[in-house]
Structures are given as C-alpha cells and as structure tokens.
Image (cartoon, rainbow, N blue to C red):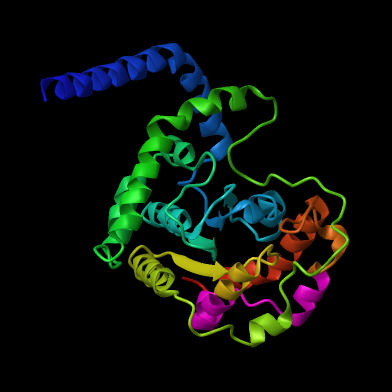
Amino acid sequence: MKSILKFILFLFLLGVFIAAGNYFLLRNEFARKNMYLVKAAGNTKDTSVFFIGSSRVLGGINDTLLSRHIGNKTVLNCGFNSGLFFSNCLLADAIIKRNGNKIVFIELTPLLPEFGEHYTVFTQVTNLDLLSSMVSIAGHDQVFKRSSFYATAFNNYIVDRFILDSRLSAYMHAPGNKLTGFHPVQGAGYNRTDCYLTSNELKIDSASDIDIDQHLNYISYLQQLSKKHNAKVVFFVPVTYNNQQERNLMRALYHALPSDLRITYSDDFLKEIAKPDLLADNNHLNQNGANRFTTLLIPIVDSVLKSGL
C-alpha cells in the first residue's frame, strides 16, 4: 500500500515539475501569442453581430463583406474548426452576458462534449468565462441524466485549456495566421452538388425518432437568456453536408424551431449557392462560394436587424 502511495505522490510531483517547466520555458511564447490573439480576435464587447459555428462558418461567412453592407454594425466570424453545438452555445452564452445589444447567429451542428481548434484560447484571451457558461447551460439541462457528457466536457476543457495551449506557439509564428474571423478554404470546385442542402429537405421533416431534446434545451435556455440581456439569437442550418446522419439531424432541428428563431433559405437562395465551382470539397465552400453565400445572407441579416431585439 505504501509503495502505491509513493508512486502516486511521485507522479503528482512529476506532473507539477513538468507543468512548472513548461510555464517558464513557454511564458514568453504565451505572452507574444496573447498579444497577437487580442488583436486578431477583435473586441467582442464592441461587436454587435456574431456568427458562431464550425469550419463551415469559419470558411463560409466573410464578416468583413457583411459588415460593409449592414450599416454601422460590426460583424465577427466566430467559426472554429470542429466547432460543435455544445461549444457554440457556451460561446453564445458568454457573449450574450456582456454589456451591449448583441445579435448572435448560431449554426446548428451535432452535439458532442468537445471544443473546436483554438476555442479555449480564444475565450481566455477575450475574457469570456467558459466555465461559468458551462455551469449555466448544464443547469438548464438534464445534468444527472447526462452526467457522463458534462464530465467529458469538463475534462476536455481542462486538457485544452491547460495542456494543449502550447501547440499554439508554433502556429502563431506563421505569418498571416489569425485565430478568428473569415478564413477561406482553398479549392477549385468539387464537381458535384449532392452535398448541398435542398429545398425539399426544408419543406419535408426527417424521421421523427431523432433525439433533439438536448439541442432544444440549449436553444430554449439561450432564447430566455437573450431576452434578459436585450440580445437576440437566431439559428441556422449549414448549406453543405458530408453525411446523411447530420442532414437528418439538422432537418429535425430546423422543423422544430419557430420561424422567428431560424434563418429560412428561399428556393432561389439555395439554387444560387448550389453550384459545384463554389465548393472547396464536399463539406466547405471555397472563397468564391463564401463571398456568394455571404452576399445572399445580407438581406436576411438586415431583416433580422430591422426586426429589433
């Protein structure tokens, strides 16, 4: 028994030593990284319109182009590689709780207890309280029923926040890299259009046995929160997919939401975007596709802004 305790103590002290060593060796890298990220992330306090989502948002919505066409509102693309609905909602919660009128567009994506690439660093640098948001959202869900989900989420947060930050030191040295904002995906066309969302999918619901309760709990919570903070949340489905399971899930969610909580794509909208030369691959728009998609979004965003909070 004593040998086991000694071994555990040894591992603990070894972990402390490694962590301390990493801190002193990398603190200058972290300082430079944080200065860069603060500049790259923009001032979330002064931003009025946010688009939160996955790599399809990151590479598909040109926030600079959008800002130029909607008056005096500042738009920030908060897409992250591998950004999923749980982390999307945590970020929305933290943003909404800040002072100022906010309109937050949130991509409807699958639910996993994971965080997108560089996500925790972004929330740290911009002083968005991710742990507080996690507690708030869990409190409005069936936390005991989904205890494994939240335990995994907390563990992933700790790993990302305190262990994987060092991966960014090399990344931030690459010229032109930035943490958030529009980052187009390079590609010359996919030569197929079967990955695009269709009008029929928005008109006809998918199978009714898809479990969307956890999604709906988060949506209900954010809707209530936005009313308290003079903000507005609007949800939208992606226009590209690389698997049928996600298509079915997104259709179920789309049809479960009232029209004032979601973006509705018209037949003409989907026809305009569904072109093979606008794709980088089977799940992402290329730069021309992103600019086209953003241009099509302008009247929709403008309508949401005019409808008020």
- Residue positioned 29% across, 66% down in the render: 140
Residue 68 visible in the current orientation? yes
Give whichever of 195, 128 is nearer the camera: 195
Which contiguous range is marked in magenta? 251-272
Q: Residue at x 78, y 54 (%)?
A: 281
Q: Residue at x 27, y 21 (%)?
A: 11
Furthest toward the bottom, the residue is: 204
Residue 84, position in %: x, y? 51, 56
Give the number of marks: 0
Task: Identify the main secondary structure in magenta.
Answer: helix
Horizontal arrangement in the rendering, residue 177 relative to residue 20 (left or right): right
Left or right relative to 268: residue 254? left
Residue 257 is a magenta residue: yes
Q: Is residue 50 left or right of residue 197?
A: left
Q: Position of residue 102 (x, y in %)?
A: 47, 59
Q: Name the residue furthest left.
A: 2
- Which one is in front, 232 or 146? 146
Q: Find residue 2 and report its horizontal and vertical position in percent.
A: 11, 21
106 above or below 46? Answer: below
Is-magenta flag for residue 147? no
Q: Residue at x 47, y 22 (%)?
A: 30
Seen in the picture, residue 225 relative to 280 is either above or below; the reply is below
